[in-house]
Image (cartoon, grey):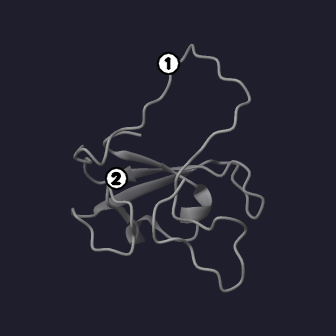
Amino acid sequence: IGRRHILTAAHCVHSYPEKVWSIVAGESAVDRPPSSSPIPVSKIHMHPDYKRPHYTHDIAILSLSSDIQWSDKSQPTCLPDDDLILGPEDGELAGWGYDNEKRKGGVPSGQLRS
């Protein structure tokens, strides 16, 4: 969402401290060597009302220790103006997670998908 902040799901980061996380901007596959150096996460800000296992308020912001360098593969999130009123529309997001409920023995995707 900016040079030093990443928006993610709280359920993806709640179990581990900041020191184990880093990001590589612009990558679409986690099963290949990264094309740039990972940026360490300095702080995880989870929604204060996030509760497992219901995934209510399942949102977190990762603060990074240094800036992301924008490229043709990594750009900030484009957000609408504050005065834009959005209706109850369906949305789409991208991630590497399971495509339905996590099943015993299941493996999350290695390729970014929406």
> What residue do we see at 69% from left, 53% from top?
50
* Residue 70, picture quadrant: top left
> What residue do we see at 58% from left, 79% from top?
107
| Badge 2: residue crowd in 10 Å (few <14, some 14–19, many ≥20) | many
Q: Is residue 55 left or right of residue 85?
A: right
**Residue that lies at the very extreme toward the bottom in this rendered image:** 105
For marks 2 and 1, the one nearer the N-term is: 2
Q: Could you tell me which secondary element the residue under label 2 belongs to?
A: strand
> What residue do we see at 70% from left, 32% from top?
89
**Residue that lies at the very extreme toward the top in this rendered image:** 83
| Label 1 sits on residue | 81
> Which of the image's four quarters has the N terminus?
top left
* Residue 90, picture quadrant: top right
| Label 2 sits on residue | 64
Question: Which percent across, then down, holds residue 112?
Answer: 46, 61
Which numbered disc, 2 or 1, marks the residue closer to the eye? Answer: 1
| Badge 1: residue crowd in 10 Å (few <14, some 14–19, many ≥20) | few
Q: Label 2 is placed on what type of residue?
A: Leu
Between the C-alphas of marks 2 and 1, the distance is 25 Å
Instruction: Looking at the picture, tell me which residue is in the foreground, 3 or 90.
Output: 90
Question: Which percent across, then down, holds residue 20?
Answer: 40, 72
Q: Could you tell me which secondary element the residue under label 1 belongs to?
A: loop
Q: Is residue 50 left or right of residue 22?
A: right
Q: Is residue 42 left or right of residue 93?
A: left
Q: Label 1 is placed on what type of residue?
A: Asp
> What residue do we see at 59% from left, 57% from top?
10
Q: Is residue 37 left or right of residue 8?
A: left
Examine the rendered structure and indicate whether residue 78 appears above or below residue 57. above
Question: Which percent across, then down, holds residue 40?
Answer: 32, 62
Instruction: Looking at the picture, tell me which residue is in the foreground, 46 or 93.
Output: 93
Examine the rendered structure and indicate whether residue 78 appears above or below residue 61. above
